[in-house]
Amino acid sequence: MVMNVKPVPTLDDEINEIRLATATIINKEILPNEAKLWGWLSDSANAPNEALEEAKALRHQIQNKVKEANLWAPHLPKPFGGMGLSFLQHAYMNEVLAYSPGAASLFGVVAPNSGNQKILVQYGTPEQHEKWLKPLTEGRMQSGFSMTEPHNPGSDPRSLTTRAVLDGDEWVINGHKWFTSNGHAADFYIVMCRTGDPNDKSGATDKMTQIIVPKNTPGVKIVRGVPVWGRSSSHCEIIYDNVRVPKENQLGRTGTGHQAAQDRLGAGRVYHCMNSIGSMWRAFDLMVERATTREVHGGEKLEDKQFIQGFIADSYIDIQAARLMTIHCAEKMESGADPRTDISAIKIFVPEAYHRVVDRAIQVWGAAGVSGDLPLANMYLGARTLRIADGPDEVHRILIAKNVLRRYHAGETWDFGN
Ligand SMILES: Cc1cc2nc3c(=O)[nH]c(=O)nc-3n(C[C@H](O)[C@H](O)[C@H](O)COP(=O)(O)OP(=O)(O)OC[C@H]3O[C@@H](n4cnc5c(N)ncnc54)[C@H](O)[C@@H]3O)c2cc1C
């Protein structure tokens, strides 16, 4: 099966060309090699060395083709080694990229590095660009984003208690974090710290600062990779015990840490949603492919059963609704309008829709659906996780209601069509 991407009449030539070029690489280089690249077909923990070496060489080969096609690092501006896409162009490219889960990494986009790169571009000094951003973009370094804490609710960033105190020319950091993704491989973490007056109990968000901490700094203790969905993971629990780093490792001005996290997450949520939509198309194609080929009970195909037709129709509706909502939100962001209500709306709706679509696709495939022979099982776990990460559904529902009610209390109604 290949992805069917055609020029979209409402998109400009440049983005249509980028989408077609991306689809060509995915169809030719990635889809036929998925099993080798990601090792779905076997237990990767026990994969033979030759298989791992082959996958590494293949990844390198594909990355070179991506670079030759000028499709490397769509999330970064040109001076920083990226494609220099506009926000909307990047969103539209992501939809295509995510048809093959994992493909983004072959195009230079790997979370959490990609989010960290964006913070470094926006808030970093020229020295920080040279020391941290450049090696990250060239693949010579890895990174993590260390914000969530086990003993405080991540959904309320004002509650974070990891503290950094200035001692001469050094920040001294003490705190306990977890779910720092990529924690084992990272060379450095961007750590969210409380830096305001220690007696201030207001929980104000302008008392947060992000600080770069190299992993090998004395006092950084990785407690464990927290197992996720019953598998070992690199989402690490980390203790920062009197960790000292130079003052120049601070990102942006003191107190801008929360704003930087919002900048990272706001745009990131739209990109994540476009990713989910690309993956939904894949799950949909897989579901329809199976429905049109699998014979059951006396020779009828699954596609002849109304239950299955219902799955197909409902999934089509879910994808189109999710896609239109996300594009609407992305267009608002691009135009400079306030997108917060819409970001919360897509952050709830798209992962839920993704979850439903993949769930139906798995049902149609039966046992094969949960096997490692298809990408569906991983997609399912990813979709469920998305309903928690980057802000749980409930928090976004509260934000939508607050924003709407504020307007009505101010004597206004919601703008029609906005
Ligand atoms: C796979 C994965 C990767 C992650 N990667 C990172 C990372 O790299 N770096 C990082 O810093 N963090 C990371 N996180 C953490 C993630 O951002 C947090 O899990 C998320 O912000 C929620 O915080 P929490 O887990 O502390 O849940 P809590 O804040 O404790 O919330 C738990 C539940 O309480 C409910 N709830 C919360 N607030 C309200 C409310 N106001 N009203 C009603 N109900 C409410 C919701 O149902 C919510 O799911 C990751 C998480 C996962 C699962």
Image: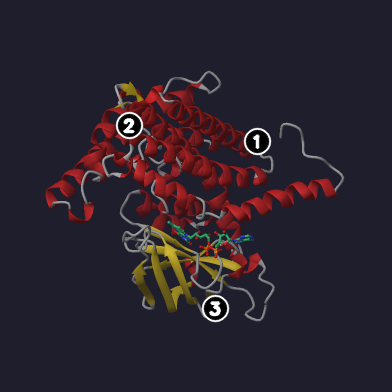
- Crowdedness near tag 3: few (<14), some (14–19) or many (≥20) residues, C-alpha within 10 Å: some
| Mark 1 residue element | helix
The reply to whether the C-beta atoms of the residues labelled 3 and 2 are less than 8 Å apart is no
Quarter of the rendering occupied by the N terminus:
top left
Q: Pointer 2: what residue?
A: 26
Q: Is residue 48 left or right of residue 261?
A: left
Q: Pointer 1: what residue?
A: 335
**Nearer the N terminus, badge 3 or badge 2?**
2
Give the amino acid type for the residue marked by disc 1 in the picture.
Answer: Ser
The percent position of residue 7, horizontal first and vertical second, equals: 46, 20
Is the shortest distance between ligand 1 and the CB of mark 3 under 8 Å? no
| Mark 2 residue element | helix
| Mark 3 residue element | strand
- Crowdedness near tag 1: few (<14), some (14–19) or many (≥20) residues, C-alpha within 10 Å: few
Residue 4 in view (yes/no): no
The reply to whether the C-beta atoms of the residues labelled 2 and 1 are less than 8 Å apart is no
**Nearer the N terminus, badge 3 or badge 1?**
3
Real-space Cα separation, disc 3 to disc 1, in angstroms: 40 Å
Q: Is residue 317 left or right of residue 285?
A: right
Q: Nearer the viewer, residue 18 or 297?
A: 297
User: Which residue is at 42% across, 48% downward?
Assistant: 382
Foreground: disc 2 or disc 1? 2
**Nearer the N terminus, badge 2 or badge 1?**
2
